Image: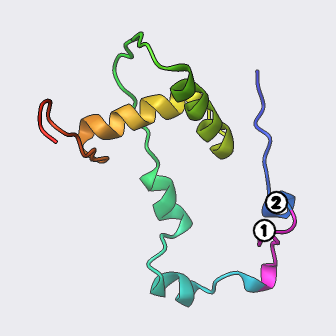
């Protein structure tokens, strides 16, 4: 059985604004002013729905497209297949709009 490594904010990398300082935490009033959810509300917001069935697809990509996708995925710490599936999902659901030029028109 795999165990999850719990990461605390004190484990964040140093530099580039990642320093964690408990004295800089937001007060409840500041959290309310910023409309941040309470921990209880945040737990209720977690996505628990998964697709009923996953479907495998095969696509052909240019090598530079795949290497660019892998590089972007590595930058954000995500597997490239997950990133590709996320982008396709956003396009399919209208959350990401693409400017496509119809064939024959410029």
Q: Residue at x 30, y 38 (%)?
A: 91
Please say whether residue 81 is visible from this viewpoint: no
Is residue 54 something that shows in the picture?
A: yes
The reply to whether the magenta stretch includes residue 90 is no
Position of residue 46 measured from the top left corner of the image (x, y, whole percent): 47, 49
Q: Residue at point 74% right, 84% down?
A: 24
Instruction: Name the element at disc 2.
Output: loop
Residue depicted at x 85% and y 57%:
11
- The residue tagged 2 is 12
Q: In this figure, what is the number of numbered marks? A: 2
Depth check: give the residue in front, 22 or 105. 105
Q: Nearer the viewer, residue 8 or 59?
A: 59
Q: CA distance from mark 1 to mark 2?
A: 6 Å
Query: Residue 105: percent from the left, percent from the top?
Result: 12, 38
Relative to residue 105, is residue 36 depicted above or below? below
Residue 20 on the magenta span: yes
Q: Is residue 51 above or below residue 106?
A: above
Q: As drawn, is 94 to the left or to the right of 2?
A: left
Asked if the residue at tag 2 contacts the one at tag 1, i.e. Cβ–Cβ closer than 8 Å, the answer is yes
Local crowd size for mark 2, using a 10 Å CA cut-off: few (<14), some (14–19), many (≥20): few
| Kind of element beneath mark 1 | loop
Q: Quadrant of residue 26?
A: bottom right
| Quadrant where the image shows the N terminus | top right
* Residue on which disc 1 sits: 18
Could you say where residue 106 lies in the image, as x and y percent from the top left? 16, 42
What label does residue 69 carry, if any?
none
Q: Nearer the viewer, residue 79 or 24?
A: 79
Magenta residues span 14-23
Q: Quadrant of residue 104?
A: top left
Dominant SS of magenta comes to loop
Please tell me how crowded label 1 is: few (under 14), some (14-19), or many (20+) other residues with Cα within 10 Å. Answer: few
């Amino acid at each position: 059985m795999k165990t999850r490594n719990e990461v605390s904010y004190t484990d964040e990398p140093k530099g580039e604004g990642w320093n964690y300082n408990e004295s800089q935490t937001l007060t409840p009033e500041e959290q309310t002013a910023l409309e941040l959810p309470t921990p209880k509300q945040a737990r209720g917001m977690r996505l628990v729905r998964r697709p009923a069935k996953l479907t495998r697809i095969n696509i052909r990509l240019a090598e530079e497209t795949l290497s660019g996708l892998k590089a972007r995925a590595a930058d954000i710490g995500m597997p490239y297949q997950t990133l590709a599936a996320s982008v396709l999902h956003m396009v399919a659901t209208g959350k990401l709009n693409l400017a496509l030029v119809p064939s024959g028109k410029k």
